[in-house]
């Protein structure tokens, strides 16, 4: 198959500089973040269509994956560009799909639009794609460049990668501690640690998650809402998930009473009380049953149950006990550690357990990504290396 376009006048390959590819991929990654937490079960992809000029890249169109995963970013960008896409370059954060699902293959749309060059960050590990999109475009005569800003794209699409390769969502752990390392005055008690600016940052991260997960002890102690309370972003609230082996979530809790407004799922053990399941289901809560392991629900199987429902990114706010259990099971992908500037000033519940501490100290598994001050809190981000 021959490519149907001829390069327009003035389109000189020599005009393209490596810095242009990096800049356009940064732009694609930034625009892709707009649908984090909303695109699942699909990845939140960003795409930019541009042409090289002597003055630098000229952006023609941009697109990102829309809510519930359709339309795809490439289709959105091509729709915006129209005929101007012919002979242009597309920078896209993930290999365009090559299979028929609920939408036609994006690789075919790219070919039909007459693009001259496609720059991708990473190959899609989905077995239905896995290099076939790149191959199809190359066979059509399109220049394909892969691997630009691959590490940033790996982190951006980590949820999709974990779901299609390990059948679980990415786990993004959030944990708050006082300056002297405590999460609460004592187990089972509520201690407000994070300041207002740091809390706003956490709510933004909630909006970028598909689901937020806590343990039943947190719910019984705090009766939380677990929604996104930033102005104008209530509809970005993630699915609320409670790890609740014995199905103890009270039907009178805030989570149960608002389950018809914000989806709320309880992960309970298969041998838990069916009468409790029914009471929660009547309130609008979905109960998902998972086998026990060492007396509690199996965390690995619990995450697989979420992935089977399409969830790609889970933010765990379950406190020290859940955090350390996830660390022990090797199920944490990113860590957000908020440290308040004031100490608790007395003995309390340690925020970082032994298994999580070992991970944070192991630079062969995790690397520090960023550190910044938000009002009264320092927020440190860590990410798994592979």
Image (tube, grey):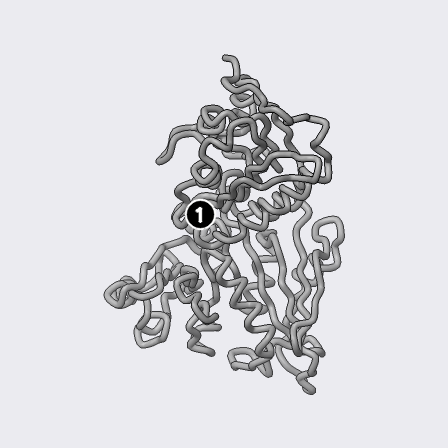
Along the viewing direction, whichever of 91 and 103 lies nearer the viewer: 91
Percent coordinates x, y for residue 121 in the rendering: 62, 37
Q: Secondary structure at mark 1?
A: helix
Residue annotated with mark 1: 307
> Considering only vertical position in the picture, is 272 above or below 164?
below
> Considering only vertical position in the picture, is 225 above or below 71?
below
How many numbered circles are shown? 1
Say which residue appears at 58% left-offset and 30% top-offset: 118
Q: Is residue 206 visible?
A: yes
Along the viewing direction, whichever of 267 and 232 lies nearer the viewer: 232
Percent coordinates x, y for residue 319 in the rendering: 55, 69
Q: Residues within 10 Å of mark 1 (few under 14, many from 20)?
A: many
> Considering only vertical position in the picture, is 292 above or below 217?
above
Q: Residue furthest toward the bottom?
A: 345
Along the viewing direction, whichever of 69 and 266 lies nearer the viewer: 69
Percent coordinates x, y for residue 229 in the rendering: 45, 71
Q: Looking at the rendering, which quadrant does residue 105 occupy?
A: top left
User: Quadrant location of the C terminus?
Assistant: top right
Say which residue appears at 50% left-offset and 18% top-offset: 4
Percent coordinates x, y for residue 70 in the rendering: 39, 43
Q: Is residue 241 visible?
A: no
Q: Looking at the rendering, which quadrant does residue 324 occupy?
A: bottom right
Say which residue appears at 61% left-offset and 47% top-offset: 27
Say which residue appears at 49% left-offset and 24% top-offset: 111
185 left or right of 164 in image: right
């Amino acid at each position: 198959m021959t490519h149907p376009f001829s390069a327009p006048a003035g389109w000189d390959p020599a005009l393209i500089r490596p810095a242009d590819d990096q800049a356009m991929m940064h732009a694609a990654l930034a625009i892709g973040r707009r649908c984090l937490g909303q695109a699942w079960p699909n990845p939140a992809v960003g795409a930019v269509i541009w042409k090289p000029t002597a003055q630098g890249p000229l952006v023609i169109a941009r697109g990102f994956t829309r809510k519930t995963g359709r339309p795809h970013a490439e289709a959105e960008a091509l729709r915006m560009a129209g005929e101007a896409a012919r002979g242009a370059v597309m920078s896209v954060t993930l290999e365009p799909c090559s299979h028929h699902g609920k939408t036609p293959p994006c690789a075919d749309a790219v070919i039909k639009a007459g693009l001259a060059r496609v720059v991708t960050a990473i190959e899609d590990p989905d077995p239905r794609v896995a290099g076939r999109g790149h191959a199809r475009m190359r066979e059509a005569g399109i220049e394909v460049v892969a691997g630009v800003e691959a590490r940033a794209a790996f982190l951006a699409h980590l949820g999709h990668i974990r779901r299609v390769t390990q059948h679980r969502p990415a786990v993004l752990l959030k944990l708050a501690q006082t300056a002297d390392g405590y999460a609460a005055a004592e187990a089972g008690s509520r201690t407000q640690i994070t300041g207002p600016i740091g809390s706003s940052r956490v709510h933004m991260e909630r909006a970028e998650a598909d689901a937020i997960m806590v343990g039943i002890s947190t719910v019984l102690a705090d009766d939380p809402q677990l929604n996104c309370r930033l102005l104008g972003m209530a509809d970005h609230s993630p699915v609320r998930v409670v790890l609740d082996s014995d199905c103890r979530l009270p039907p009178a809790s805030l989570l149960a009473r608002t389950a018809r407004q914000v989806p709320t799922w309880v992960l309970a053990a298969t041998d838990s009380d069916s009468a409790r399941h029914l009471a929660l289901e009547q309130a609008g809560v979905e109960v998902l049953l998972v086998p026990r392991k060492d007396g509690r629900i199996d965390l690995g199987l619990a995450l697989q149950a979420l992935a089977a429902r399409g969830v790609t990114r889970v933010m765990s706010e379950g406190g020290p006990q859940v955090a350390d259990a996830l660390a022990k099971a090797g199920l944490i992908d990113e860590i957000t550690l908020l440290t308040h500037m004031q100490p608790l000033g007395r003995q309390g519940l340690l925020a970082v357990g032994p298994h999580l501490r070992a991970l944070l100290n192991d630079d062969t598994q995790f690397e520090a990504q960023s550190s910044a001050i938000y009002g009264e809190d320092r927020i440190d981000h860590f990410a798994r290396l592979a």
